[in-house]
Image (spheres, rainbow, N blue to C red):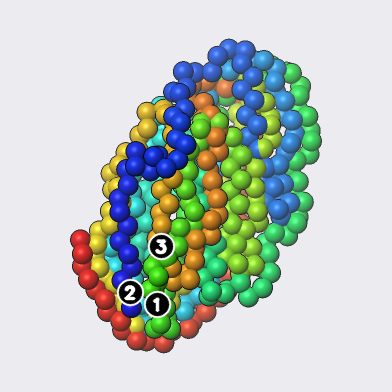
């Protein structure tokens, strides 16, 4: 067995040398009368035809006032849990523990603040502290509740295509082509003077839990070379771009692929485009709360145990802290263009290198820092509380029992 390759730590400066990381200017505050045409592409066009691509022309271009103090909270509290509870046990009892206890903390207390004044203080805790069990979620809560969260571009594709095919062609398409169009073409171009000084609090608090509690032990089948070619791609081509270029486009084109090639499509190709090109002049005083509370659970609790009890311990105890208390508090440069490439390049064919392009590079112009007040007071609640639980509970047991210890303890 080849030990998983250790990843070098990169500072945001190192990463940005490989990217076109032109720093966005600090947002001085929205000027009165400015259009602030997001062109958000709130597409939600998941290819479910969860179109949400509204293309509504929420024109709101009224040349209103942007009487700041928006707090675009986006407090959706979605909990995109995706917590299917599949129990893809595959825990053949090998124990390919890979629980390394590495503490691949991946930011443990990163506070990828990115809030600079917006409170983009996601407190993401991109925990990845899986204690490895490759928890991939262990308390991540990908909070993004930061009170803006606009930290898209993650590439959290997790579109594993592991060769675990799991893409059995189940056509768990979930891309039902529902035509949740939401792209009604409303042309809310009322020019009403939508003040949008609402103090919106777009504080999503999504909890993009992804905290599947998978235990992706990946230990089964004792071969699992575990990347003899060390790709573990996990290179999802994340680019964790965060290169937002500050457009706050919301045109993240997330693709939340989850398209593990299972045809559990989840790769809905959502294009959560949010591309509404709203021109949300936002001077309305609407309270577009968007506090949906969807609970997109996706927190599958799959127990992709694959922990066959081989004890491929790989419990290296490396403490790959990866920025435990980085405080990427960018101070408005909203560069977010880290291009981390969280390679995880073990190459097991656990490809996870989905190249999801959870780009979140939205080039958003996260202006929204202005403390605009957009206090329109309309209460567009959108507080759906969907609970897209997707909590399937499958129990793919596959657990065999081998005991490959590999407990290096590098630290």
Q: Could you say which quadrant of the image residue 220 lies in? A: bottom left
Mark closest to the chain's N terminus, 2 or 3: 2
Q: Mark 2: few, some, or many residues within 10 Å (few <14, many ≥20)?
A: some
| Residue 389 visible somewhere in the drawing | no
The numbered dot on residue 314 is: none
Q: Quadrant of the N terminus?
A: bottom left
Residue displayed at 55% across by 14% down: 31
Report if the CB atoms under discs 1 and 2 are less than 8 Å apart: yes
| Whole-number angstrom distance, CA of label 1 to CA of label 3 | 13 Å
Element at badge 1? Answer: loop
The numbered dot on residue 2 is: 2
Q: Nearer the viewer, residue 350 or 86?
A: 350
The numbered dot on residue 225 is: 1
Q: Quadrant of the C terminus?
A: bottom left
Report if the CB atoms under discs 2 and 3 are less than 8 Å apart: no
Q: Position of residue 333 (x, y in %)?
A: 42, 29
């Amino acid at each position: 067995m080849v030990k998983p390759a250790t990843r070098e730590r990169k500072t945001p400066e190192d990463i940005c040398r490989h990217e076109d990381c032109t720093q966005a200017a600090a947002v001085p505050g929205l000027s009165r009368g400015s259009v602030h045409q997001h062109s958000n592409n709130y597409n939600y066009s998941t290819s479910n035809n969860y179109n949400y691509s509204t293309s509504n022309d929420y024109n709101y271009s009224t040349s209103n006032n942007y009487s700041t103090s928006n707090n675009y909270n986006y407090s959706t509290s979605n909990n995109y849990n995706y917590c299917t509870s599949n129990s893809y046990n595959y825990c053949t009892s090998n124990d390919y523990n890979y629980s390394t206890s590495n503490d691949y903390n991946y930011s443990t207390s990163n506070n990828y603040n990115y809030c600079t004044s917006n409170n983009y203080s996601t407190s993401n805790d991109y925990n990845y502290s899986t204690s490895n069990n490759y928890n991939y979620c262990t308390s991540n809560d990908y909070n993004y509740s930061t009170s803006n969260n606009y930290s898209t571009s993650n590439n959290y594709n997790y579109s594993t295509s592991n060769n675990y095919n799991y893409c059995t062609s189940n056509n768990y398409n979930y891309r039902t082509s529902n035509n949740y169009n939401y792209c009604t073409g409303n042309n809310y171009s009322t020019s009403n003077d939508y003040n949008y000084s609402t103090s919106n609090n777009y504080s999503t608090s999504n909890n993009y839990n992804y905290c599947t509690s998978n235990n992706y032990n990946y230990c089964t089948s004792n071969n699992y070379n575990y990347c003899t070619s060390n790709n573990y791609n996990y290179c999802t081509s994340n680019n964790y771009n965060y290169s937002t270029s500050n457009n706050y486009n919301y045109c993240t084109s997330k693709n939340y692929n989850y398209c593990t090639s299972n045809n559990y499509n989840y790769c809905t190709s959502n294009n959560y485009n949010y591309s509404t090109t709203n021109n949300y002049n936002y001077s309305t005083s609407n309270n577009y709360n968007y506090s949906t509370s969807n609970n997109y659970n996706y927190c599958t609790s799959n127990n992709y145990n694959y922990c066959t009890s081989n004890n491929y311990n790989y419990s290296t105890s490396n403490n790959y802290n990866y920025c435990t208390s980085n405080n990427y508090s960018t101070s408005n440069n909203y560069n977010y263009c880290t291009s981390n490439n969280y390679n995880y390049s073990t190459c097991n064919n656990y490809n996870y290198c989905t190249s999801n392009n959870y780009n979140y590079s939205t080039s958003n112009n996260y202006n929204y820092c202005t403390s605009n007040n957009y206090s329109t007071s309309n209460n567009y609640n959108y507080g759906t509380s969907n609970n897209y639980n997707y909590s399937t509970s499958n129990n793919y047991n596959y657990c065999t029992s081998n005991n490959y210890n590999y407990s290096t303890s590098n630290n």
